[in-house]
Image (spheres, rainbow, N blue to C red):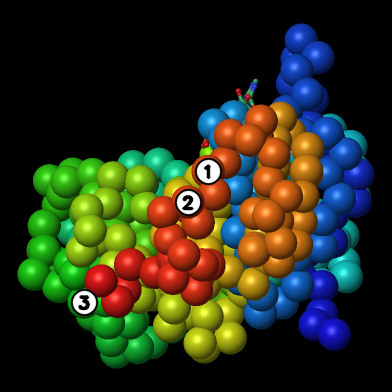
Amino acid sequence: MANPLFSVKNLSKVFPGKVWALTEVTLTIFEKESLVIAGSNGSGKTLLLRILTGLAEATSGEILFRGRPLAQTLPEIRHSVGLVFQDPDAQIVGETAEEDTAFGPQNLGLPKAEVETRVKTALTALGLGEKREFSPRRLSGGEKRRLAIAGILAMGCDTLIFDEPFANLDWPGVKQVLESIRKLKAEGKTLIILTHELEKTLAYADRLVILHQGAIRDDGKPAEVLDRLDPAYGVRDPRSTYASVEDCTWLTE
Ligand SMILES: Nc1ncnc2c1ncn2[C@@H]1O[C@H](COP(=O)(O)OP(=O)(O)OP(=O)(O)O)[C@@H](O)[C@H]1O
Ligand SMILES: [Mg+2]
């Protein structure tokens, strides 16, 4: 049995005005699994992962990271969990693409040569090798997203969280991101992908969680969850286009 990475129990988030954004969420995320969390706009995906990474606070509930209370583990989370933000502009820090990608590994205190190798590998993997000297502000929306992903890849985290990784991406961009996800999975990383674009990710998912109006509505093997999917959740079953979950890959096209 795999070790729990995040153990979430009865987590709720209530905003002023009694707006319940998350309601009694109970979820265990295991090490080395590939988990897709799907749900319509406003279902609470980003908020849940912001709380798990210490960027927002829960109103009530318990969160353990590797068996220890979240508040005691934030420095460890910062080193071992990489979060690719839904909004890439929120993540840009460098004056050039290269400098931006180097920021994370430099903060980890890695030697200069190692940082350079990681930056080059990550930018090449995301198709940005030729834009390494560009200002991130001059990159297109899709290029910015790929840059944000490169920065997280270069950190070499054990756990990667992708918040809507395909937004704004063209077909080659989707393939580059999927190829990175496939490699990370093969390397035994824990992957958490928040998306409503199930057709792009399901072939790489061990597990699918459905979030709707701030509550977990289903959790299980992707094919089984899709078999009993309630259309009210606003998540589209990609098998209406593809014959099976295994066929839901853009990499072979
Ligand atoms: N600071 C805030 N004050 C009030 N409500 C908030 C605040 N932040 C988030 N919310 C609400 O929490 C709910 C969940 O938001 P969240 O960003 O997690 O949705 P999401 O599932 O990531 O949606 P999307 O698919 O659009 O990215 C939304 O209804 C949002 O309006
Ligand atoms: Mg979101």
Q: Nearer the viewer, mark 1 or mark 2?
A: 2
Let me know if residue 129 appears in the view. yes
Q: Are marks 1 and 2 in contact (CB under 8 Å)?
A: yes
Residue at 71% x, 61% y: name it. Answer: 224
Which residue is under mark 2?
240
Question: Which residue is nearer to you in this view: 148 or 163?
Answer: 163
For the residues labelled 3 and 1, the Cα–Cα distance comes to 33 Å
Residue at 52% x, 88% y: name it. Answer: 187
* Horizontal side, residue 73 vs residue 229: left or right: right
Q: Is mark 3 within 8 Å of ligand 2?
A: no
* Vertical side of 197 occupied by 215: above or below: above
* Vertical side of 174 occupied by 218: above or below: above
The picture quadrant where one finds residue 110 is bottom left
* Horizontal side, residue 29 vs residue 60: left or right: left
Q: Are marks 3 and 1 in contact (CB under 8 Å)?
A: no
Let me know if residue 72 appears in the view. no
The numbered disc on residue 236 is 1
Q: Give the percent coordinates (x, y) of residue 19.
A: 75, 18
Question: Which residue is nearer to you in this view: 200 or 223?
Answer: 223
Q: Is mark 2 within 8 Å of ligand 1?
A: no
- Tell me which amino acid carries mark 3: Thr
Which residue is under mark 3?
124
Q: Give the percent coordinates (x, y) of residue 35.
A: 63, 64
- Tell me which amino acid carries mark 2: Ser
Q: Secondary structure at mark 1?
A: loop
